[in-house]
Amino acid sequence: MNPLSISSLPRREFLKSGGALIVAFSGFSGANMSFAQEPVAPGLRAAGPGPPDARLIDTWIAIHADNTATVYIGYVELGQGASTALLQIAAEELDLDMSQISSVRNDTHVTPNQGATVASAAIERGGPTIRAAAAEARQALLALSSRRLGAPADRLTVSKGVVSVAGNPGASVKYGDLLGDKPFAVPFTGNAPQKPVSQYKIVGARHPRLDLPDKVSATYVYVQQVRLPGMLHGRVVRPQGQGAYADGARVVSIDAASIAAIPSARVIRKRDFLGVVSPNEWDAVRAAKQLKVVWDVPASLAGTDGLFDQMRSAKTIDSVIAEKGDVSSALARATHVVNATYRGPYQGHMPFGPNCAVADVTSDGATVMCSTQSVYGTRDKVAKVLGVSATSVRVQYYEGAGTFGRSCYDDAAQAAAMMSQDSGKPVRVQFSRADEHGWDNFGPAHLADVKVAADASGRIVAYEYDGWQHVWSTIETSEQLALGTPANESPDGTSRNLNKITLGSMYDIGNLRLNNHRVPGIKGYLKASNLRSPLDVSFAFASEQAVDELAHMAGIDPLEFRRRNMSDPRWLGVVDAVAKAANWTPGRAVASTRRSHGRVVTGRGIGLGTHMSSYGAAIADVRVDRDTGAVVCTHLYGALDAGLVVNPAAVENQISGQLVQAASRTLKEEVTFSKTNVTSLDWNSYAILRFGETPAVTPIVVQRMDQKSTGAGEEVVAAASAAIANAFFDATGVRLREYPLTASRVKAALARA
Amino acid sequence: MALTITVNERRESVTAAPDTPLLYVLANDLALNGPRFGCGLAQCGSCSVLVDGVETRSCVTPVARVEGKRVTTLEGLAGYYAKLAKLSTAPALHPLQQAIIDEQAAQCGYCYNGMIVKGAELLSKIPRPTEAQIRTAMNGHLCRCGTYPRVLAAIQRAAQVMAEVTR
């Protein structure tokens, strides 16, 4: 990997807890409740429930008397570094040093509503707003300075929040003296002139993550560590592992005497929602485990082995996502045709610390602390289960473990809120490992039939992709059980249908058709939602393997084959960048059928991947033990063009993480289930890549200062997944068209070959 | 029942059932944020502490079992290191904590309690571990964000720094 040479970082007061575990908590007594460790400047914030008015500069930025600024950001820090990068954007426009700027905890009483932090869009969608607000704030500050200094605004320069008059070094004023803790009281029009990219000093430069010092020194407070005075510990009680989404879980009977030996514990029941609370956490854990409940568990799943047959025979809702040319006749005329079926499993978010939420529900309102990707979205969901208005609920964000999409955070928030409402006390609900593994909103399984064809010169002439998958569940488990809300699904849409960007768009193909087969996912399937690089891992695994098979059939080096079929300079840019970093030697895949049949073989493969608008390419080096079936990624290279990369250091970390996660998801991860329930309930039954198996990684940021910033957290997972599959073929001469590439699957495939 | 345990060089009196996992006592009674719940099954390492210098999963260790032993959490790691290295004053951070910042290793950071505690144990036993030794020692510590390569680099960096300090 490329080591970062950042030493001796300044300790920052960012999201700082002051080391206190017990959070001072004042209920709803004051409209501007704030935590002692994070004072909110008085008088600047909206009093009461938000969102604050997005059309006011004061909603976004406050200037303090000590010449520092607070930026109010609607996106959350998920460990991806977005909070640092968004402050870089604000500091750049405001001409402040990074040490002079900070943000506050996301809070429905404090921070603006910029939508959910999903699709790696914090910088792509949130950045322009923060940039525009900072530019407009700077303009207002310059107008004030002009009056104060008696000089026209166009003669003013700003450095580190000090405004000076050009040619008159004695005349200067600090932002803090102009406006210290007083409102701007100006509208946010979005029309202020912005700094040209050529003058950027902070944006585009490597900056150490602001959250890391507290994270390594145990002063950072994760949601799992929030403790309120008088709080009860809560645990949900559910069947071990979810069944089919529509079935939820039905309580037949509860044997209250089964926990009589734990007198501090109390059972909470709301319809089929069951939990236990106790002032003592260990008592709550034991009670949840010992409480005897008879559940009605219908055998309505197909089981892992029956899943793909079930999907293929489902009565699907079909649509054509993209179509050009005449695929059928192009296929008929082609010299080389690949026609193959690929499969991708359900996979889980499985945050490393299971979800947790702390709620305090009183007659005055509710406060919920949780690790949601959308504080305003969670507010609505909590209000629904409490039967109160959204504006009587306050949601505050505390970071949890990396979630990579919609894990059980809203489920935990609803559970904590209902248990607090029932108990009349604050309740902290900590999901167990089996709760999280068993009741996740999994990334959905995918089945694909791919036909891709080339002419004699190696030009791709036809591409047809038929894909089966179901969309996302919309009702959280706690709500489904407590209110009896029927299971429901999201509509079709991005990340739920075939992705016309991932599937074929990187190649110049005249005849293409994407046939989407939406499987009705309510009855007989697991709950599902967006998991990092949603469906794109399966799409790339299928599509980029099919393209690789075609290259091999045509006898052309797989890198050269791809280059020959693409003209977009940004795709070519990432392909060339990764090839250069890995020192790609042409011709290897062509030779794969001549591979030795030694016990341990090695191979190399390439793959491309995207999600929305960024460009990812990866090269994988793998080692395969033909006897044990073990596949190890020895080195993974990933190149990403995400336009203007605000913080290349943070994006390198994102690429590295994506490469390792791609190895984990391609080689290891698979949700298993019987006809009644999910059976992969811990880190043994749902294996992930371990430290000893980690590849060396080489992240490459293709910086494009002239392009708008786009997402940086999804594309390389997809690219690397395909690269690993193609490297497996290069090593063994055998195609594995279903992932994960587990030892048993590898041995079976090699035995068949 | 009343128990006395020694955590980060301080004797602490706590009231807990003897089979209570040490983690809950550290987190709830002693308000420590280092050890944290990950699985409750000793599978992941997020709850790790040192017990008499040995990395131990506090989620499955009954609190009664550490009576009379020295428990060190992430909070006390710099002091523990200073004592081992015979430094006159404890640094603010263990060299591995600093190396993790220098390498910009963490993402969500949740697994880093265990990564740091286990890495510190390794460095106390093997001052200059090879890459293979690091991989073996750390294999029981999982990371969901995929930051293993940077943890590895941070352990190597810390080993170098520690060698310079004690030279």
Image: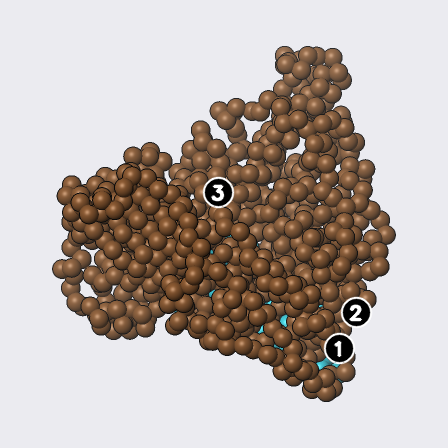
Chain colours: A brown, B cyan
* Residue toward you, A739 or A470: A470
Residue behind mark 1? A266
Callouts 1 and 2 in the same chain: yes
Q: Quadrant of residue A146?
A: top right
The disc label shown at residue A423, or none: 2
x 72%, y 73%: residue: A269
- Cα gap from disc 3 to disc 1, whole angstroms: 46 Å
Q: Quadrant of residue A406?
A: bottom right
* Residue toward you, A738 or A472: A472
Marks 1,2: beta carbons within 8 A? yes
* Image quarter (top left, top right, bottom left or bottom right) of the N terminus of chain B: bottom right
Binning the other alpha carbons within 10 Å of mark 3 as few (below 14), some (14 to 19) or many (20 upward) gives: many
In terms of secondary structure, where does tag 1 sit?
strand
Whether residue A439 sits left or right of residue A518 in the image: it is right
* Residue toward you, A397 or B98: A397
Callouts 3 and 1 in the same chain: yes
- Cα gap from disc 2 to disc 3, whole angstroms: 43 Å
The amino acid pointed to by label 3 is: Gly
The disc label shown at residue A389, or none: none
Q: Nearer the viewer, mark 2 or mark 3?
A: 2
Can you give x and y, in whole percent of width and height, for residue B5 in the image?
69, 76
Residue behind mark 3? A711
The amino acid pointed to by label 2 is: Ser
Q: Earlier in the sequence, mark 2 or mark 3?
A: 2
The amino acid pointed to by label 1 is: Arg
Can you give x and y, in whole percent of width and height, for residue A585 in the image?
21, 47
